[in-house]
Amino acid sequence: MKAWILAIALFAGACATTPPPPPPVIDTAALTFDGVRLDPGGTIDPALLREALASYQRHYGTVKRDTRIFDLPGRRIESEVSPIRRDVLAVVDYRISSAANRFFLVDTSTGAVAGYLVAHGRNSDPAGDPAGLAPLTRLDTKSGAVRASNRLDSNMSAVGAYVAANIYNDGIAPGSVRLHGLDSTNSCSYWRAIVMHQGHNMTPDPATGDTGTSNGCLVVEIDKRPEIAARIADGGFIYAGPASLHLPSVADGLASQQACEAVRLKPELGPQPIPPAP
């Protein structure tokens, strides 16, 4: 009898769900993460790093493993979402020149920072169209961004917290990473097809130092994409800011494809175009 009871107890223990780890201890004033001082060299603007840490603290533990759907005419996109990890924190400072490092990966176990180039949306640029209605033209820049939006067709960057999902092959630049916005300021990002991908236009022009812009995606240099993707995919936390760049709109806080597309700037475009096949 005792052996039978012990067997039942062992079986029940084996089937029990392992509780999630406790949230990290974050001190936004001291810029510490589980007691580790982040960015001791001061590479990232401390005010923005505090903004990012406060956001991480607010969102950690709120993202569940899930498959999210993006329906296109004749095609369905699936994104595999993972809970927020605690080993890496990415901070994007869109105010910095696009020709300088402004995508920062912070190792939370050591505090060390690695910096990379990243594009901003063409209409986030001072030379862009704030209304988002002008025809798209090639835009090269070495400026920082001056505005951000959550709205489809704005062709602006969106600020706020993101969780990085799976790596996928977009048919043009393999190794892209799907992104999901966690704040009201970037809640439509998935249905804007905002992702992290590589681009030739992020190699600075040797004569001018200019880099290219995007339609809102986080575009990085081709040779840097593999290491960035490997570090952020499947649960990496990204904070793009500062929040003060955000232009409020009717899209803010919407959290479905139907809702986000219903308030797009160019309703005649209908659903998002079908991306290239893998």
Image (spheres, rainbow, N blue to C red):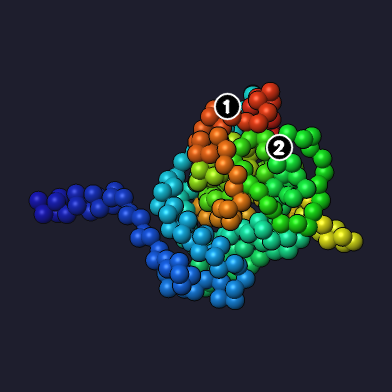
Using a 10 Å C-alpha cutoff, classify the residue at mark 1 as few (fewer than 14 neighbours), some (14 to 19) or many (20 or more). Answer: some
Q: Please, what is the three-letter code of the amino acid marked with disc 2? A: Gly
Q: Quadrant of the C terminus?
A: top right
| Residue at position x 58%, y 56% in the image | 242
Residue 239, disc: none
Task: Say how many tags the image has.
Answer: 2
Residue at (79% x, 54% y) in the render:
141
The residue sitting at the bottom extreme is: 41
**For mark 1, what is the residue?**
262
Which residue is painted at 50% across and 46% down in the image?
183
Above or below, 165 against 78 in this view is below
Q: Residues within 10 Å of mark 2 (few under 14, many from 20)?
A: many
Residue 43 coordinates in the image, percent (x, y): 62, 71
Q: Nearer the viewer, residue 223 or 266?
A: 266
Where's residue 61, x and y in %?
40, 52
Q: Position of residue 163 (x, y in %)?
A: 52, 50
N-terminal label among 2 and 1: 2
Q: Nearer the viewer, residue 74 or 38?
A: 38
- 108 horizontally vs 8: left or right: right
Answer yes or no: is residue 148 visible.
Answer: yes
Q: Mark 2 points at which residue?
A: 132
**Residue 107 in which image quadrant:** bottom right
Amino acid residing under circle 1:
Ala
What residue appears at the point 90 percent right and 61 percent down from the top-left corner? 207
The span from disc 2 to disc 1 (Cα, nearest Å) is 16 Å
Do residues under tags 2 and 1 come within 8 Å of each other at their CB atoms?
Answer: no
Which SS class for mark 2? loop
Q: Is residue 217 above or below residue 35?
A: above
